[in-house]
Amino acid sequence: MPERRVTVASKVGLHARPAAVLAKAAAGQPVKITIRKDDGQPVEAASVLGLMTLGAMHGDEVVLAADGEGADAALEAIADIIATDLDEA
């Protein structure tokens, strides 16, 4: 299963607006994507509530995972969003 590690760029972490933007983008991918912190359980990236309970703050590293056709491209797209300061967008 392909994985990507990415650092959260948004100053508020994956909370509120950044979580909503990320969940919408993840829901639009052709594969199910999960996200976790190193020491945590994975949650579905398409779930705003799941993202907010993850507790990922600015500067935290998260691990994305997906499986299936198109997984690599989907992970890259979601990693790019997480690596962007969505508070500025």
Image (cartoon, grey):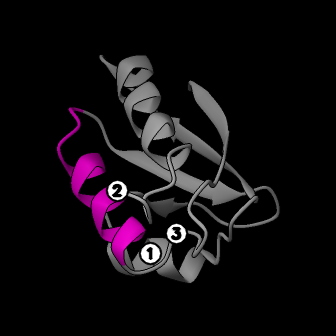
- The local crowd at label 3, few if under 14, some if 14 to 19, many if 20 or more residues have their Cα within 10 Å, is many
Q: Are marks 3 and 1 in contact (CB under 8 Å)?
A: no
- The quarter in which the N terminus is drawn is top right
Q: Does the magenta stretch include residue 78?
A: no
Query: Which residue in the protein does label 1 denote?
Result: 50
Q: Is residue 38 left or right of residue 50?
A: right
Amino acid type at circle 3 is: Leu
Residue drawn at point x = 39 percent, y = 24 percent: 71
N-terminal of the pair, mark 2 or mark 3, is 3
Residue drawn at point x = 50 percent, y = 37 percent: 79
* Residue 89 circle label: 2
Q: Is residue 29 magenta?
A: yes
Residue 55, quarter of the rendered image? bottom right
Q: Distance between the residues labelled 1 and 2?
A: 22 Å
- The local crowd at label 1, few if under 14, some if 14 to 19, many if 20 or more residues have their Cα within 10 Å, is some
Amino acid type at circle 1 is: Gly
User: Of 3 and 56, which appears nearest the observer?
Assistant: 56
Q: Nearer the viewer, mark 2 or mark 3?
A: 2
* Residue 14 circle label: 3
